[in-house]
Image (cartoon, rainbow, N blue to C red):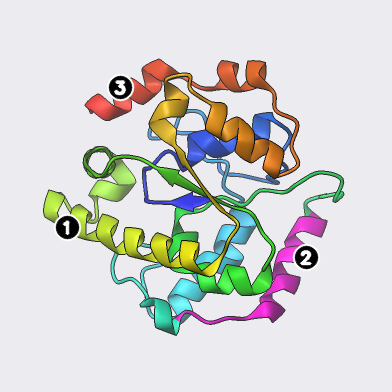
C-alpha cells in the first residue's frame, strides 16, 4: 500500500488489518497518527530507508528524491523481506500487507521482488495532503512552504502513474470516502486481496471526527 505522504494510507491499512491482513510489528500511534501507522518497522528500515540512503536520497522520502530511472530492480532482496516475515511469525495462511508511502519512490524495486502483488494506491486531494504535511510535526520540519509540498506531491503523483502503467494490479481508493462511511471500493479491494470483509470492524476503526480534525488543522 502506498500513496502521497499524509494521504490516509495508515487509516486504509488499518481497515485492511481489521479484515485480517497480516502486518507484523508496526509503528505505534502518536499525536500525529493516534490510531497507529500500520507500517512494518523492520521492512521500512531494512528495505525502503536503506535503499534510499544507498541512492543518496532522503530516507524519509521528502528531499532529495530518487529519479525513477535509477531505482534498482533487485529480486534478490526478496529474501530480506521473507526473512523479516519469518522472524515476525507470518504463517502464510492469510495475505500480508506492507504499507509505506515511500514505496511510491521505490516501486520498481518492489515490483521486481513481487511481480504479482496487488497494489493499493490511496488518494486524497492535493490541498488536503499539503495542509496535513504543514500541520504534522515530522513533515513540517522539512519545510513550512506550501509550494515545497506541492512539488513533493507532484513528484509522488508522477511515480504513482508510472506504477499504474507498469502493473495491472493497481487499485485506487479515496481515503476521504472511507472516512465518510463509503467503503464499497475498499471492500472490493479487500475481496480481491483474498481478505474477508468485516464492515463492522472497519466501521469501528475509522474515526470520521479524527479525519475531519486533521483536514481542518
Is residue 152 visible in the rendered image? The answer is yes
Label 2 vs label 3, nearer the camera: 3
Which stretch appears magenta? 71-87
| 141 within the magenta span | no
Is residue 145 visible in the rendered image? The answer is no
Residue 148's disc is 1
> Percent position (x, y) of residue 59?
42, 66
Q: Kindly check if marks 1 and 2 are in contact, taking CB atoms under 8 A apart as contact.
A: no
* Position above or below: 136 against 49: above
Inter-mark Cα distance, 1 to 3: 23 Å
Inter-mark Cα distance, 2 to 3: 39 Å
Inter-mark Cα distance, 1 to 2: 38 Å
Q: Secondary structure at mark 3?
A: helix
Residue at point 42% right, 60% down?
160
* Position above or below: 174 against 159: above
- The residue where tag 3 is placed is 213
Q: Secondary structure at mark 1?
A: helix
In the rendered image, which quarter contains the C terminus? top left
Instruction: Decide which of tag 2 and tag 3 comes sooner along the chain.
Output: 2
* Position above or below: 9 against 85: above
> Percent position (x, y) of residue 152?
26, 59
Task: Please tell me how crowded label 1 is: few (under 14), some (14-19), or many (20+) other residues with Cα within 10 Å.
Answer: some
Camera-side residue of 213 and 184: 184
> Percent position (x, y) of residue 62?
32, 61
Q: Secondary structure at mark 2?
A: helix
Residue 83's disc is 2
| Figure quadrant of residue 209 | top left
* Position above or below: 189 against 99: above
Amino acid at each position: 500500500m502506498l500513496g502521497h505522504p499524509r494521504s490516509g494510507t495508515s487509516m486504509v491499512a488499518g481497515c485492511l488489518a481489521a479484515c485480517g491482513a497480516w502486518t507484523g510489528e508496526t509503528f505505534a500511534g502518536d499525536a500525529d497518527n493516534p490510531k497507529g501507522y500500520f507500517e512494518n518497522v523492520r521492512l521500512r528500515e531494512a528495505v525502503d530507508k536503506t535503499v534510499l540512503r544507498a541512492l543518496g536520497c532522503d530516507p524519509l522520502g521528502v528531499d532529495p528524491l530518487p529519479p525513477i530511472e535509477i531505482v534498482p530492480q533487485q529480486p534478490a532482496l526478496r529474501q530480506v523481506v521473507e526473512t523479516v516475515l519469518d522472524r515476525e511469525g507470518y504463517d502464510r495462511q492469510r495475505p500480508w500487507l506492507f504499507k509505506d508511502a515511500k514505496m511510491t519512490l521505490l516501486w520498481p524495486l518492489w515490483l521486481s521482488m513481487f511481480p504479482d502483488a496487488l497494489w493499493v494506491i490511496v488518494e486524497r486531494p492535493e490541498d488536503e495532503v499539503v495542509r496535513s504535511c504543514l500541520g504534522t510535526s515530522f513533515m513540517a520540519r522539512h519545510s513550512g512552504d506550501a509550494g515545497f509540498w506541492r512539488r513533493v506531491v507532484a513528484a509522488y503523483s508522477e511515480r504513482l502513474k508510472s506504477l499504474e502503467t507498469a502493473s495491472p494490479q493497481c487499485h485506487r481508493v479515496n481515503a476521504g470516502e472511507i472516512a465518510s462511511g463509503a467503503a464499497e471500493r475498499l471492500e472490493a479491494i479487500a475481496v480481491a486481496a483474498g481478505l474477508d470483509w468485516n464492515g463492522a470492524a472497519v466501521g469501528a476503526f475509522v474515526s470520521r471526527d479524527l479525519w475531519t480534525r486533521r483536514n481542518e488543522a
